[in-house]
Each structure stands twice: as C-alpha cells, then as structure tokens.
C-alpha cells in the first residue's frame, strides 16, 4: 500500500463542485507541485484541515482550474493515510484535466472501493463498517439510511464482538476442564455449557431472522398488483403514488405492460408493480403484457390480488389464486363504496387461510390500511424498535438488522456449528468435540467483521464499490 492513489470522488456529470481525492504518503507533495494558493501565507502543510483558495496549474504554468484545496494529515483521515481533496468546478473537463495532472505527478488511479479498502486494512473501519458505506450511499429511505448508519458507527460489529466474547468464555471453561478434568463437576459443566450455548445461539438466530427485513431495506419490497382487468389495479397504484402515474379508463386491457415505481411506505422502500389485467385474450400485444404479469408473481415478495366486488368471482379469479404462493398473498376486495355482488360467505370461502381486506382505493383510509399491511409484511415492527424476547435478553430495545447476504451466510454457518455443539453437549460427547464446533462458530463470526477473512473475500467486498470511494 506504499503507492499514492487518486480518483474523482463525486458523481460524473455537471455540477457546482467536483472533488478529486488523493490518499497516500505522496499526497501533500503532489498537491504542492500543482496547487498555487492565492495567498503565499496559506500553504496547505501549515494550514491542514482548512480549505485554501487557489489555482491548479500544469507543468507549463497554464491554469487548469480555480479550486479549493485541503490537506488532512494521517492518521485522522478516512483512509488513516495522508489525504488531499481538491474541490474543482464540477464539469467533466476541469475534473478530468486535474485528475490527469495528479496522475502525471506520481499518483495511481484508484480502483473501485480502494479508499475504503485502505481504511479497512489500516484499521480505520472493520469489514461490516466498510460494507455499510455502500448501504449509506444507496439508501432508498430514511429507515434504510438509519440502519446503514448504525452499522457504519459500529453497532452491528459491537454485537458480533459481544457474542464472540461469550463464545470465548465458553472455550475458556472447556480448556480448563480439558487440562484439569474433574469428574465430580462434569455433569454440572455439561448442563452449564448447553445453557450458555443455547443463549448464544438464540442471539445469532434472531439476527438471521432479521435478514428478511434487512434485505427489503436494502433492495426494496417487491409488490406486484394483479387481478383481472378493471378491478382497480392502476387506481391503487395512483393512490399510493399520490399522482396519476398509470392510465385509468373503463376499457378493459388499458394497461398493456408492467409499470414500476419506487415508493416509501412508513420508511420501507417498496417497488410497486402495476401489471396488465390477467384474462383470456386473442390480442397478441395484450397477451405479452399478461405473460409479464405472471412473471412478476415469481419475483414478488408480496402479491396484492385485487377483486372487483361489483362483479361475481370468476373462474379466472380462481386460476389467478392457484398461481400465487399463499404465504405472500394479500387479497383486496375492491370497490366497497359501490353495490357488492359478492356475499360475505363467498368472500370467506374464496379467501380462506389468506389475508384479505375489503377496501375502496378511492378512500384514503383504505389506502392507509393497505400501506399498514405492506409495512407489517416487510417486518416494519423491527424498524420501530419493538422489544422482542431476544432484545430483552440482550438488554436492547432496538435490535440490529442484518442487511447483507454475506453476513447472513456467516451467521447461518455459525448457528449450525453452535447447534452441533449443543447436540454434542446434551449427548455428553467428549469436550474436545464440543471445542471444535464452538471454535468454528467463533471463526465464522469473525469472518463478518473481517477479523479472520481471506483476501479473495476482501477483494470481492470492495469490488462492489464505486470509483472514488
């Protein structure tokens, strides 16, 4: 890591300001070669952490840009190295010309995520905090931002390290009893170990359970609105968007393609998908839309199946019902503001063992109730910090939420190892057998924070970053 790296740290395109970031031991020397302060009394070396006005000039003395420059000496920087930032005008010409000059003066072009990778390798961040940087940047709602910021501040790492500390205490007990066996306390020891391991596994399991909500916060909840033509699908989408995004007419088959919009439902990012009405048709174009509607069912986390209360339940409704996984189905019997042709008995029979609501999408109260149902499906109670039994056990009123698939995978492996250790303890297996499984769990949790992780995993994590971060 002896090389000095540089990159444009801001998004491409035209803007008021664009930033060139430089990190490494040659950062200040490079700045001194190209930056000419407007006042000679304001040298960056003597005025670190202060923005200094001046000009960037090339090797021939030509002015490249009018800038503000700042020097951050190590170790109190993002990368824990010497860092320089040059605030240029935000156009592509001044930015690219300034970066080219920096590279000619000895810096290497940074790889995607290399600044954050250096922060990790220099001990400035652990691996979970480094990964949280991406989540902060990509946050879709305030709730997803809050969870990412908690992880960036080290809250998730702290919980993982606390669990590892409990595992260490168990390993110490085992090591002492292996080295100094005492048959009189052996039965007591096994009972104690089993209780401690179950307590630890419960905390790990809870983190695993939170991952569904975490994935939704990170990627969004995919909600497909399906049903026959003219049941109110597009009207529901418009009501939830608070704007007329989808065309609404009395003509069946108006929606020929899927329409997708990202909305914020109580802090949950929701990918709302309005689909073409599903029915038998000879129209080739409409059939393409219907086929796409059916594909949306497969990728959806929640399927809102709408039925028109002013029409009788049809065989097509039953066909749609049979195509949907009941565990992710919400049935809306819509147009409750009009005269119904479906009896309560028919509703109960059709929607047995399925969550259903009687609504009118023209009524704001009904829309609020639908949004509440979506919020609950997404695990919104976790975001509200509602106390669970595991939270009480951990002494916390707001649990960490696992948003990263890599973290979930390591937690699942740790839970498996702990489960095997529990079975070994309850079966009175030799302590050496327990020790192997418990150490595996300890190592697997270490992979999460980066305490024990291979180089290829590190490279994979940082390859997902954007250039300049």
Image: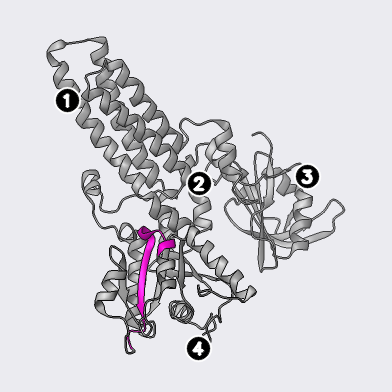
Viewer can see residue 80:
no
Percent coordinates x, y for residue 162 in the rendering: 32, 37
Q: Nearer the viewer, mark 2 or mark 3?
A: 2
Number of residues whose C-alpha sits closer than 10 Å to that of mark 2, classed few (under 14), some (14–19) or many (20 or more): many
Task: Please state if 19 lies on the left or on the right of 179 as rendered.
Answer: right
On the image, numbered disc 3 is attached to which residue? 105
State whether residue 167 is above or below residue 432.
below
Q: Secondary structure at mark 2?
A: helix
Percent coordinates x, y for residue 419 in the rendering: 30, 31
State whether residue 177 is above or below residue 72.
above
What mark, if any, has residue 191 been given in the picture?
Answer: 1
Labels 2 and 3 touching (C-beta < 8 A): no
On the image, numbered disc 2 is attached to which residue? 131
On the image, numbered disc 4 is attached to which residue? 250
Mark 3 or mark 4, which is nearer the start of the sequence? 3
Number of residues whose C-alpha sits closer than 10 Å to that of mark 3, classed few (under 14), some (14–19) or many (20 or more): some
Please give the name of the residue rendered at 37% of the width and 47% of the height, measured from the top-left corner.
Answer: 155
Mark 4 or mark 2, which is nearer the start of the sequence? 2
Mark 2 or mark 1, which is nearer the start of the sequence? 2
Mark 3 or mark 1, which is nearer the start of the sequence? 3
Furthest residue in direction left, as rendered? 184
User: What is the distance, in whole Å, between disc 1 and disc 3 at their CAs?
Assistant: 66 Å
Please give the name of the residue rendered at 68% of the width and 43% of the height, measured from the top-left corner.
Answer: 5
User: The magenta stretch spans which residues?
Assistant: 322-337
User: What is the distance, in whole Å, between disc 4 and disc 1 at their CAs?
Assistant: 70 Å
Percent coordinates x, y for residue 249 in the rendering: 52, 87
Residue 336 among those drawn in magenta: yes
Percent coordinates x, y for residue 437 in the rendering: 35, 24
Q: Secondary structure at mark 3?
A: loop
Please give the name of the residue rendered at 40% of the width and 48% of the height, measured from the top-left corner.
Answer: 402
Q: Secondary structure at mark 1?
A: helix
């Amino acid at each position: 890591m002896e090389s000095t790296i540089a990159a444009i740290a801001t998004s491409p395109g035209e803007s008021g300001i664009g930033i060139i970031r430089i990190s490494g031991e040659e950062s200040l020397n490079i700045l001194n070669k190209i930056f000419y302060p407007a006042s000679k009394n304001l040298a960056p070396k003597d005025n670190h952490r202060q923005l200094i006005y001046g000009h960037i000039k090339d090797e021939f003395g030509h002015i490249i840009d009018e800038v503000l420059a700042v020097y951050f000496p190590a170790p109190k920087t993002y990368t824990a190295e010497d860092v320089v930032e040059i605030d240029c005008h935000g156009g592509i010409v001044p930015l690219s010309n300034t970066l080219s000059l920096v590279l000619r003066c000895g810096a290497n072009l940074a790889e995607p995520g290399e600044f954050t990778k250096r922060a990790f390798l220099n001990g400035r961040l652990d691996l979970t905090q480094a990964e949280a940087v991406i989540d902060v940047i990509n946050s879709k709602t305030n709730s997803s931002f809050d969870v990412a910021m908690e992880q960036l501040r080290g809250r998730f790492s702290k919980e993982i390290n606390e669990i590892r500390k409990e595992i260490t205490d168990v390993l110490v007990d085992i090591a002492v009893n292996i080295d100094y066996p005492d048959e009189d306390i052996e039965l007591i020891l096994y009972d104690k170990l089993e209780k401690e391991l179950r307590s630890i596994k419960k905390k790990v399991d809870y983190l695993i359970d939170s991952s569904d909500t975490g994935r939704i916060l990170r990627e969004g909840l995919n909600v497909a609105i399906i049903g026959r033509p003219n049941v109110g699908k597009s009207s529901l989408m418009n009501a939830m968007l608070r704007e007329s995004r989808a065309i609404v007419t009395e003509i069946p088959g108006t929606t020929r393609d899927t329409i997708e919009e990202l909305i914020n439902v109580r802090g949950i990012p929701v990918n709302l998908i309005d689909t073409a009405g599903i029915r038998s048709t000879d129209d080739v174009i409409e059939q393409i839309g219907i086929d796409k509607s059916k594909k949306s069912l497969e990728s959806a986390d929640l399927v809102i199946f709408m039925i028109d209360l002013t029409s009788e339940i049809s065989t097509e409704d039953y066909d749609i019902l049979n195509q949907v996984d009941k565990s992710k189905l919400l049935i809306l019997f819509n147009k409750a503001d009009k005269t119904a042709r479906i009896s309560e008995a028919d509703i109960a029979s059709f929607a047995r063992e399925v969550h259903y609501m009687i609504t009118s999408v023209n009524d704001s109260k009904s829309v609020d109730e639908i949004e509440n149902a979506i919020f609950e499906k997404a695990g919104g109670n976790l975001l509200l910090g509602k106390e669970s039994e595991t939270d009480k056990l951990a002494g916390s009123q707001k649990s960490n939420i696992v948003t990263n698939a890599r973290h979930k995978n390591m937690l699942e492996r740790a839970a498996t190892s702990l489960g095997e250790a529990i079975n070994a303890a309850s079966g009175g297996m030799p302590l050496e057998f327990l020790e192997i499984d418990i150490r595996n769990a300890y190592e697997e949790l270490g992979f999460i924070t980066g305490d024990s992780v291979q180089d290829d995993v590190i490279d994979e994590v940082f390859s997902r970053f954007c250039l300049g971060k």
